[in-house]
Structure formats: C-alpha cells, structure tokens
Image (spheres, grey):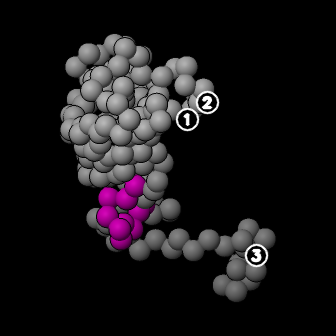
Amino acid sequence: MTEQPELMIDLSGIVKSEGMELAVSKEYPKEAFLEFDQSLSLETPVTLTGTITNHAGNSFLKGTLSFTLNLSCDRCLEPFSKAFTIPMEDTIAREDSGLEADEFIPYQHNTVLLTEAIYKCIFAVTLDQQLCKSDCKGLCSVCGCNRNETNCNCDDTEIDPRLLKLKELLK
C-alpha cells in the first residue's frame, strides 16, 4: 500500500480522548483504488461521509460511501452506469491493539488510510447481480441477439436430450 498523505485521515484530535468524535467528509479520486483492482471502473470519485468515534482505545468509523460504477449487465452484457450509496462501518485501531488483523483497520502516527477498506466495500457490491434495468430480457440463448433491442422469435425451449427421439416421432 503506497503512502498517500492527501488521502490520510488525521485522528490526533480524538485518539487520546475517550468519547471524542471526528466528522469525516472526504473524496477519494478514482485512481486511489487502481492499486487494488486495475479493472475497477469508477465513473465518479468515492465520497465518504460519517463519523469516527474514540471508545475504549479504539476508534469506530460509521459512514456512507457514495460512488458511481461503470458496469456490464449480467444478462445482456451492455455497459451501463449505476450510482451506489452504501454503509461503511469499521474499527480503527493500533497495530498492537490485540485484535485479529482482519477485524480492524490499522493506523500509525495518528493517521489512517481507508482506501483498502473502501475498496473492499466497493468490491462487495460488484458481487451482486448487476442489471442494466430490472426487467432486462438478456441475450437469446439460440442466436445471441439482445432481446431488449430485438425480438428474434427463436425457439429457446430446452428439451431433455433423452427425449429428442420422442420429439422426432411426434413430427
């Protein structure tokens, strides 16, 4: 992970005071996530808004990520853009906090870099089925045309191969 001072969040105002809260509103450029995934196609920067609260020696991030992704429809393969607003909650702690490595985002010198954690949230939404529209008809399994654009009239009813001989007898 590369040092990116402009993307760091300064925690010095809250780490030494129990119950202190830091309002966060930060915009991360699209390029900030390329080190994790070269194929990630963000249309807009990623905006994080929320709070980081110090409690019992650890800090807790509760916020919202807003961004727009360029995607391909899982049914018709057409490109489209989709805006997302998703929650982000994480624990921010020192390396020596005693927590398991996958349970927190580490900070050093009172600063934290959230780009990897943000990327994981973005990646998680890409695992869901992405459709250009809720009623997308997809591609024809016979001729391959986009059924949203063309009505091909192909017979796409699948017949069990064991019953093909029976179909021939009925002709």
Tag 2–tag 3 contact (CB < 8 Å):
no
| Residue positioned most to the bottom | 170
Tag 3–tag 1 contact (CB < 8 Å):
no
Query: In front here: 119 or 152?
Result: 119
The kind of residue on which mark 1 rests is Glu
Task: Answer with left or right where residue 39 lies relative to residue 97.
Answer: left
Q: How many marks?
A: 3
Please state the horizontal and vertical placement of residue 82, each as a whole percent of the image.
28, 52
Mark yes or no: residue 19 visible.
yes
User: Circle 3 sits in a helix, a strand or a loop, which is it?
Assistant: helix
Q: Quadrant of residue 148?
A: bottom left
Please state the horizontal and vertical placement of residue 9, each as a whole percent of the image.
28, 26
Q: Which residues are magenta?
A: 130-139
Q: Which residue is mark 2?
A: 100
Query: In front here: 51 or 144?
Result: 51
Q: Residues within 10 Å of mark 1 (few under 14, many from 20)?
A: few
Q: Residue at x 35, y 51 (%)?
A: 86
Gap in angstroms between the C-alphas marked 3 and 1: 54 Å
Please state the horizontal and vertical placement of residue 169, each as a whole percent of the image.
74, 83
Per the rendering, the mark at residue 140 is none
Gap in angstroms between the C-alphas marked 2 and 1: 5 Å
Q: Which residue is mark 1?
A: 103
Per the rendering, the mark at residue 163 is 3
Task: Nearest to the eye among marks 2 and 3: give it.
Answer: 2
User: Circle 2 sits in a helix, a strand or a loop, which is it?
Assistant: loop
